[in-house]
């Protein structure tokens, strides 16, 4: 199917403003790991990649995961750093190019914890996590000391402060998918008996809340902070941190109170209801429930505009473009505020302008080979 702009998709192209961030539309480029930064330094090819998406009318670009200044904050050699003079100079080139093309952008700040990367690359130092686990009863690396934890919080904040200094428009903290912040949330990987652990999800959210607080102090009151969260983990796709709305409130409300403006709610398919036992098969999705419970701005994401989810893509499956009627209906109901699009924009820098109707070229089909290119 060809996705074309009609009056029915106008909701996608309404402007959006949050604090100092003013977006021309509601479409966000989802962060996607690319590993094209040798030595952790983004080069001109990375800057050009993001600039093309800005020129293609993406409302807000979220970068690939960029890592904080910790010895083992990355799990692939080519993941970019967000620290050090050379890497930050590379990111300055990126954001300047995006702005010249009329776009807005925030880096996604990341620590991969004890999680393996796709290539099983071995970092030069021992990996760290809350309890030295990659999953339940599955040890890998070392448990972080209290000093490690406090230094890591400071490293997140420093990276966010650098983002503001470089001229980025906002910042996103990666708290999803079984990486470090999420390993503190998950009872299967956080067995600590100090202030960074606890029997309840609310207690285990303390680390993330402190990261958000420190980040807020580093960037000031008017600079938007997003936090990406998920129920599922790379270690276990079926895991759910919050089985009920009350548990979800205990998990996420402290993070909003700490200073997170936006919660980026990652799920495999945006149209799937989060609690169908409460509001049925057409009920609110993850982002919809989070907005209802916390009042925060939410970004939804998950297989937008494509026929298959991203797990299939990693398995070598292509995805055909699909219509956007279901997305439009949910946005018209104000279920969530923004929609993140990943693989469709990875394959086609002009996906947004084509949906809008200002670019007459046909859509480019997503194929898994796109992961190996920086087009």
Image (tube, helix red, strand yellow):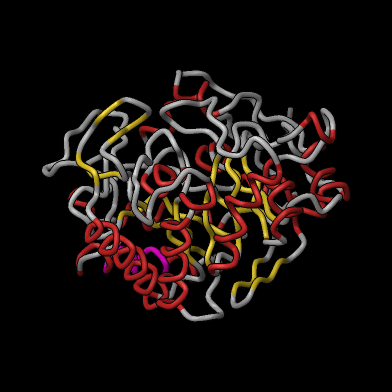
Residue at screen point 20% across, 66% down: 84
Name the spot of residue 96 as percent of width and height, x first: 41, 70
Q: Main secondary structure of the magenta part?
A: helix
Which residue is more in the foreground, 257 or 119? 257
Q: Is residue 363 left or right of residue 154?
A: right
- Relative to 96, say whether 37 is above or below: above
State the image coordinates of residue 299 (x, y, percent, origin top left): 64, 52
In the image shown, does 356 or 229 lie closer to the viewer?
A: 229
Image quadrant assignment for residue 345 = top right
Q: Residue at x 52, y 21 (%)?
A: 312
Which quadrant would the C terminus be assigned to in this image? Answer: top left
What residue do we see at 72% from left, 31% from top?
Answer: 272
Question: Residue 112 at x, y = what percent?
Answer: 33, 44
Q: Residue furthest left?
A: 124
In the rendered image, is residue 173 in sight?
yes
| Residue 57 visible in the snapshot | no
Q: Is residue 32 magenta?
A: no
- Name above or below for residue 68 compared with residue 154: above
Inspect the magenta stretch and tell me whether residue 94 lies in it.
yes
Q: Which residues are magenta?
A: 89-96
Q: Position of residue 191 (x, y in %)?
A: 36, 40
Res 83 quadrant in image: bottom left
* Nearer-the-camera pick, 68 or 80: 68
Which quarter of the figure is the N terminus placed in? top right
Q: Is residue 308 left or right of residue 35?
A: right
């Amino acid at each position: 199917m060809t996705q074309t702009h009609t009056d029915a998709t106008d909701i996608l192209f309404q402007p959006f403003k949050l604090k100092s961030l003013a977006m021309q539309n509601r479409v966000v480029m989802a962060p996607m790991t690319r590993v094209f930064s040798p030595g952790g330094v983004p080069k001109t090819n990375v800057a050009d990649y993001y600039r093309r998406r800005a020129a293609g009318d993406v409302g807000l670009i979220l970068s690939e995961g960029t890592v904080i200044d910790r010895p083992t904050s990355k799990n692939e050699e080519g993941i970019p750093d967000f620290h050090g003079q050379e890497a930050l100079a590379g990111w300055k080139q990126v954001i300047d190019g995006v702005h010249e093309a009329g776009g807005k952008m925030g880096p996604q700040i990341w620590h991969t914890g004890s999680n393996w990367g796709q290539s099983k690359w071995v970092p030069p130092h021992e990996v760290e996590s809350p309890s030295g686990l990659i999953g339940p009863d599955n040890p890998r690396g070392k448990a972080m000391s209290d000093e490690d934890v406090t230094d890591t919080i400071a490293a997140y904040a420093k990276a966010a402060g650098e983002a503001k200094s470089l001229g980025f428009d906002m910042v996103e903290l990666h708290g999803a998918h079984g990486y470090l912040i999420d390993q503190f949330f998950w009872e299967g990987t956080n067995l600590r008996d100090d202030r960074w652990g606890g029997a309840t999800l609310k207690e285990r959210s303390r680390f993330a809340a402190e990261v958000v607080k420190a980040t807020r102090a580093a960037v000031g009151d008017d600079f938007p902070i997003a936090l990406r969260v998920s129920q599922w983990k790379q270690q276990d796709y079926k895991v759910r941190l919050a089985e009920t709305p009350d548990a979800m409130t205990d998990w996420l409300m402290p993070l909003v109170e700490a200073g997170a403006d936006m919660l980026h709610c990652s799920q495999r398919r945006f149209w799937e209801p989060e609690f169908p036992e409460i509001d049925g098969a057409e009920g609110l999705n993850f982002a919809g429930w989070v907005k209802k419970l916390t009042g925060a701005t939410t970004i939804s994401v998950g297989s937008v505009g494509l026929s298959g989810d991203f797990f299939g893509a990693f398995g070598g499956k292509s995805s055909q473009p699909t219509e956007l009627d279901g997305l439009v209906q949910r946005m018209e109901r104000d279920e969530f505020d923004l929609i993140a699009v990943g693989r469709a924009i990875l394959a086609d820098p002009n996906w947004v302008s084509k949906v809008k109707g200002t670019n007459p070229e046909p859509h480019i089909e997503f194929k898994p080979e796109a992961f190996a290119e920086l087009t």
